[in-house]
Image: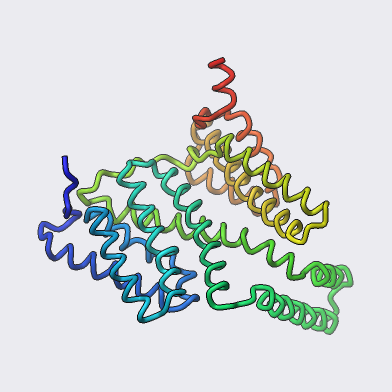
Amino acid sequence: MEEEMVKRIWSSNKNVESFVVIFLSMLVMFISAASIDINLLGIFLLPIPIMLLCLKFSWKISVLIIGISSVINIFTYGVSGTLSAILVTAIIGITFAYCIENEFSSVNIVKTVIAISFVLLILNVLLYTSINNVSIVEHLNKIVKLLKDEIDNMIITYKQVGVGNSNIDILVNFKDFIDVKVVLGIIPTMILGYCIVFNTINYVIIEKLLRNSNIKPIKKVGFRHFYISNLLGALLVGLVSIAVILNVKKFAIGEFLELSLISITDIIMIINGMATITYLLRKKLKKSRGLVIVILLLLINLGFQQILFYIGFTEMLFDFRRLDPYSLRKKKKEV
């Protein structure tokens, strides 16, 4: 059976709906390519019209429309802006559409898009700096200098108002700690957090947008179904181990990789720990959603991230919730 070239999402008038979707898709591609500042926000809202384009039209037509937009962008904004628009807006929108068409669950849609957008944003930054001959280190040196100057001003202010030496010592130690390598190591973690927040918001908007459409409803599963596969866990542990070895051996990139990968692993395992606690409270203890949210916020605000990390790491290893299709426990039972 051949793929339908044009589908109806909401309106009974296919022509009007087609025009609106094509117009919005081309518009967000132009907006995304306009500047690096706008493009870094490209994963927020801008992929949604691209997602609608791919859901409404066949993949061939969708790619053709994106291609036409990209050709126009090359003449208007140059290669750098065009590549950024393709990476950050088009591919993420396509990923959303692919996941929805293939009936991914809500959690798996968000996980897939977060992973892909994280890689694409890193690649986007690298391509931008390479094409435009921008020195990342030079920019980071300026940022570090601004931060240290700001800390110096805070120290002077603290001394003038009579703040205790212990608080001033904290600022002094923080100033000594900050350098280009530290900031560079934190950037991937910030990008991951950025991807998690904005893609989750995107999903919420998309789910509401498609609720009354002709698209098959997204299979909604709660946050408690979020899990980290044994395979991903093994990959993260392996990468962290390699980074630690490189740092011990005094490779230039070792410290950056170690800090970045440990921070990223922390975030992933903490989220897995939060999902595990949500599962216990909602599934086993039958607690309300509101109470669960309050408990999770308290755990974060009271500094129990390390406990959440260990819970998430342990659950990843032993798969107590039986969610991981690649679980080592399942394989042992099969043997």
| Residue 290 against residue 10 in the figure, above or below | above
**Is residue 81 or residue 162 the one in the foreground?**
81
Q: Position of residue 188 (x, y in %)?
A: 61, 60
Q: Is residue 302 visible?
A: no
Q: Position of residue 47 (x, y in %)?
A: 37, 62
**Is residue 101 or residue 305 the one in the foreground?**
101
Q: Position of residue 278 (x, y in %)?
A: 54, 39
Residue at x-position 40% and y-position 44%: 106
Residue at x-position 87% and y-position 72%: 164
Residue at x-position 25% and y-position 44%: 216
Query: In the picture, which quadrant includes the N terminus?
Result: top left
**Is residue 139 or residue 24 the one in the foreground?**
139
Q: Is residue 54 visible?
A: yes
Q: Quadrant of residue 281?
A: top right
Q: Position of residue 113 (x, y in %)?
A: 45, 52
**Is residue 111 left or right of 319 when viewed as pictured?**
left
Query: In the picture, which quadrant includes the C terminus?
Result: top right
**Is residue 125 or residue 110 the one in the foreground?**
125
| Residue 97 against residue 72 in the figure, above or below | above
**Is residue 18 left or right of 285 when viewed as pictured?**
left
**Is residue 56 left or right of 50 when viewed as pictured?**
left
* Image colouring: rainbow
| Residue 46 against residue 287 in the figure, above or below | below
| Residue 317 against residue 166 in the figure, above or below | above
